[in-house]
Every structure is written in C-alpha cells, then in structure tokens.
Image (cartoon, grey):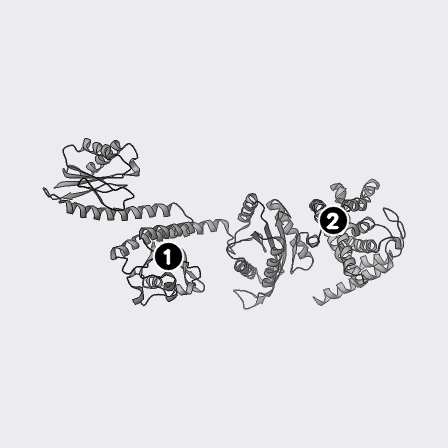
Amino acid sequence: MTGFLEVGWGESYLADAQQAGAEATRKALESLGHTIPELVLVFASDEYDPEMVEKGVNDIVAGYPVVMKTLPNGGESFLRRNGVLVNMVTSTFASLLLPRNQSLPEEEVDEFLQERHKAFQELSAVHKLGNLLNSSLDLNNVINKAVDIVGKLMIADGCALLLTEETEQGLTFTLSAFYGSVDLKYVKNDDYKESFPYYAMLLQKPLRTGDAAKCPYISKEINRITQAKSIMAVPVTGKGTKVGVLCVFSTERDFFTKDDLRFLGILANQIGIAVLNANLFRKTQMLACTDGLTGLYHHNFFLKHLDNLIANATAEVISLILIDLDGFKYINEQFGNKTGDDVLIQTASILRTFFGTGNMVARYGGDEFVVVLPHVDSDQSLLLAEEVRRKIAGNKFACSTTEVTHRLTASIGTATFPQDGSRAMELIDKANRAMYRVKRSAGDRVEAYLADLKEMHLTEFDQAFFDIIRILIDSLDSRDRYTWEHSRQVSQYAAAIAQELGLNRQEVETIRLASYLHDLGKIHLDFRILNKPKWLDEEEFRAVKLHPVVGANLISPIQGFAPLVPLVLYHHEWFNGHGYPKKLCGQDIPLGARIISVADGFDAMTSNRPYRRAMADEQAMAELIRMKGTQYDPEVVEAMRKVLERINTWRKNIG
C-alpha cells in the first residue's frame, strides 16, 4: 500500500508560514508510518503566504507531487487557481491510504475534497459547539449559545430549544431559547404540546418534514407565526436523561436532507450533555446557598446578595420586607416540629409564588423570612407587603401528618435604601425594628421604618431640616431603643385621648406628631444616663430636665413644625405649676402638652426600666388618678381612663 497524504493546520500553528507548513507535514508523515505517499494535498488558511507554506512542505516531501489548497473569504466555495483546486482546512490533519499505483483524476480529487470539506466542517462545528458550551456552566448562557450556533450552522430561519421538566402538575415542555427573527414570546406553552418537536420528544426519535402543510404534527398557531415549511426536530438527551428537543426550521420546502437530520442529532447530543452539566452545577450552587427545609436562599447568601446590591447601587432604591410569623412558636410546641416545618414550607411557597424568581426571597431565621426588592420604593414595598400579609392570613396551613389545618398571621416590617440606611446591616436593622413594633402591638400588620413621619408633606426648605431630624431620631433609636418605642406608644395614647376629648382631625395629628418627637431632646444625654440602672443623682437629673428645651430648639427651624414646638417644650409642666422648664400651671399649659404629659406618664409606668419593673395598667391608672390636679389635668386623666376601658374591652373581645 502507498499513501495519499492530506496535511492541514490552523490555530495550533500560528508561527511563520514556512515553519507551520513543515511542522504540519512532518506530523502527517509520522501518522503514515513508513508508507510512501504518491500525492501530497496541502490545506492551508489564506492567512498564510502560499509560497512560504509550499516551501515548508517541499523541504519535507521533496520529490513528491504537491497540490496546494487554500479557500479564501471564509471558505464559502471551492476555487480553482491556475488549474489547481483551492481549499481550506483550519485545524487538523489526516491521512487516506490508497491502493498501490492508484492515481486520482482531477474530478475525483474535486469530489473527494468536497466530501472531506463537508466532513471537516461538521467535525469543526461539533468541536466549536463543544468548546463554547463547555466554556460556561450558566444554563441560560449555554442554551442561548447552543441555538445561535446550531441555527447558523444549519442555515435555518429559526432554531428552538425546548426543555422538559417533571413538576407536580406533570410534564412541562417550555421554549427555553430561540434563534431567528420571529417573535414567539406570546406563544403559550400548551401550544408546544401540539407541535412537531413535542411528537419527536414523545416518540424519542428524530423527525423531518419537507412540507409542513402535509404533516399532521404541526401546531397551526406556531406555524402561522414561523411560516415554517421544512422542519427537523431531534430529541435532546444526555447520559440517558431526556432533556428536551432541538428543532430547526426553514421557510423553504425540502430544505433539509437526511444528512442534516443526522448532523442535528450529533449537535443535540452535545447540547444535552452541556445542559445536564449546567443543571447539575446550578443545583450544586443552589444547595450551597439555600435553606434545606424551604428551598429558599439562606441567611448568609441573602446578606452577601444585599451587600452586593447596595455596593453597586447608584441612585436606585432597594426595599427590604422582613416577615415574622405570629403564633408560630405555639403551633410548633403544641402540634410538633413536623407541623412547624410544614407551615414554614408552605409560607416559603406563598412568598416564592407571589414574588416570583426575579426577586431574592430568603429564610432569615427560624420563622422569619426576608424579601429584597430592587427598584421598589417605600410606598410600593408597603403595598406588596400588605398583599403578602393578606395571603398568609387567608391561607389554611395543612399538616402532612394530620387533617388539621391552621391559621397564622404575620408581622411585617419594611425599610428602603438609601433613605433608611446606606449599608446592608443598617437596612436590615431598620426593617427589623419596624417588624418588632408590629409584633409588640398584636401583630398581623405591616409597618415601614419611621412610618409615623413618612406621611408628612413638607416644603423643600422644611425637608432639608427634617432630614437632619431623621438622622437624630435614628441615632437616638440606636443608642436607646426604649426612648423611641416609648415615644411611639405615647403618640398612640395621646392621639386616642385627643379623640376622646373631641378635638378635630388636624389637632389630633399635631398632638400625635408632637408626642412622637417629645423626647427627641434626649439626644444630648450621655448613653450612661439614658440607660442607668439606678435612680439619677441631682446633676444627672438637671441634665435630663433640659431635654424639652433641646427638643423644641431642634424642631423649631422647620416651619411646618411650628404648632409642635410648644407641645414638645411644655410636656413636663405640672398642672399645679411645679413642673419644668417654665413652671406653667393649669390652662396656661397648652392642651396638647397636658395630653402628652398624661400619655407619657402612663406609658412610663407600664414599661420595664433598668431601675424598676413595669406596673400593671390598673396600677398606673390609679397613680394617674391620685396625681390629677397636681401633676396631671383632671379632664385629661378622665379621658385616659375611658381610653383604657375601651382598650381592655377590645382585648377581652379578641380573647
């Protein structure tokens, strides 16, 4: 036997042309062993100098006939240069052994070259597809690359990859990636179950038609959009697993051949393996960042995600929703951990369904969940949180071990970047504070951080000062959680007293806001005084007595707060004139300040402090009555008594 030698090279030999030709030829000869070639065909990219390539070959195979083959302009056609066939091969070499003394006429060489060129194009395409698919483990990236490459290789008008997945509702068949100019985004997934690709998946065999009008397995709706006449569909599998279907179409009849169908099958196998690898990688990643019980993201991954969002944010807003299940501890203790787990799993499902896959939903703690909403402002997040609260309250939580169902509610707090915090932990803390305020007030409600101040309509001038006030409020809240929680409770009691006294809506709102800000002046106090576990000494008490003046001075530059200033300044005046800072008495003290004084005294007595335990409501009310006419306005004390009666009646009615 003698040999017919085929030599080619490309990206592997980007040296000078002469060296590349010699090196490729030497490797090809080694593959032939001791067989002597009768003819040497040399394939080279037109980026090389043909004369230098030929010289490099002749140096190795001197005395043998050499035919140089190059295919310029991207390899679109075979050319003939000076009677010699021109071709291009870009990445490999091979050999073909022929019977001794057999020669090849030029037309046979031409046919042989075309066959070799086609085979090489297929191998090169498979190699290229494999490299591109294996360069990424991101599933979306993989499938979009796949359809783009296949569509162009097959010179198709469209290429689609439809993936299958077993769900609780059965087998889904979803268009996952598409190449082409038509718009398939309005096609429903159910339409694909009447399509040519779906039958290829059911039959698990390649299908081809050259005239879609005569084929019974065609979706009329999809065909109307694509205008497809020739269609090929090949099942996509990987390692024995059904992945989906790869489909190409042309608007020309009889466009695809049997060889095209065979080649599409080769490409489909590669895509199947790549999709499986990407899925496996995604599942591995999910296991590393998800909670094992609920399937939501876990605490640490949520923190990293929020950190990254805030670090990369420019002027956009990011809202946080923190959700705590009311009564979960009771359910868990009374009905067992399995029931508790079922409740958590179903809550996760509610959140995942409502917020979709585009938003971060995570399990923050035992029965706490958190949602990150980029591009969602404070008002929008409150609306979404309220809708979720309703869904949780309206859900019947089933248990897998019994037929008993349970009802739960949720306490929800929200905070928004950048207005409530510029760092992740700061934002979480604000949402957490809002949520716990709801929790302490019977739950089943949504509240934003500093919600009491967000409904005010301030001028641009006032807003500049108010932004400073917000910073001071935040600072005081972080130093002394009691002061601000106390202020919130005082504002609720004071508003209720004002309503009981028959004040109008504007007066009630003024008193409510003044109550909320009445202790703002404590920002000047040392942390040790604010949290001292013993009674204050004389010097410390003198410092504390300055806080109404400091608070009034802080809010006085805000024109819209003018009605609040005297209420903040005089809320520690006594009805008998023994208070501070001005020792006003009786009707000289603004009514709003007298109302705040009673509400302030009642909440202070019914709250735990470092130096004493909280009184019961009845004891505190008795103390207010004892002090009416001296410290407190008798009329306001009587209004507070009626408010407390209503609160106690409400508590009895709800059990």
Mark 1 vs 2, N-terminal side: 1
Residue 281 in percent (x, y) is at: 42, 49
Query: In front: 75, or 373?
Result: 75
Query: The N terminus appears in which quarter of the rendering?
Result: top left
Residue visible at 14% across and 33% down in the picture: 63
Residue kind at label 2, given as amino acid type: Thr
Label 2 crowd (10 A; few <14 / some 14-19 / many >=20):
some
The disc label shown at residue 160, or none: 1
Residue tagged 2: 483
Residue kind at label 1, given as amino acid type: Ala
- Asked if 283 appears above or below 335 in the picture, the reply is above
Q: Nearer the viewer, mark 1 or mark 2?
A: 1
Query: In front: 432, or 416?
Result: 416
* Helix, strand or loop at mark 2: helix
Residue 49 in percent (x, y) is at: 26, 34
- Asked if 152 appears above or below 1 in the picture, the reply is below
Q: Quadrant of residue 366?
A: bottom right
Residue 473 seen in this snapshot: no
- Asked if 513 appears above or below 59 in the picture, the reply is below
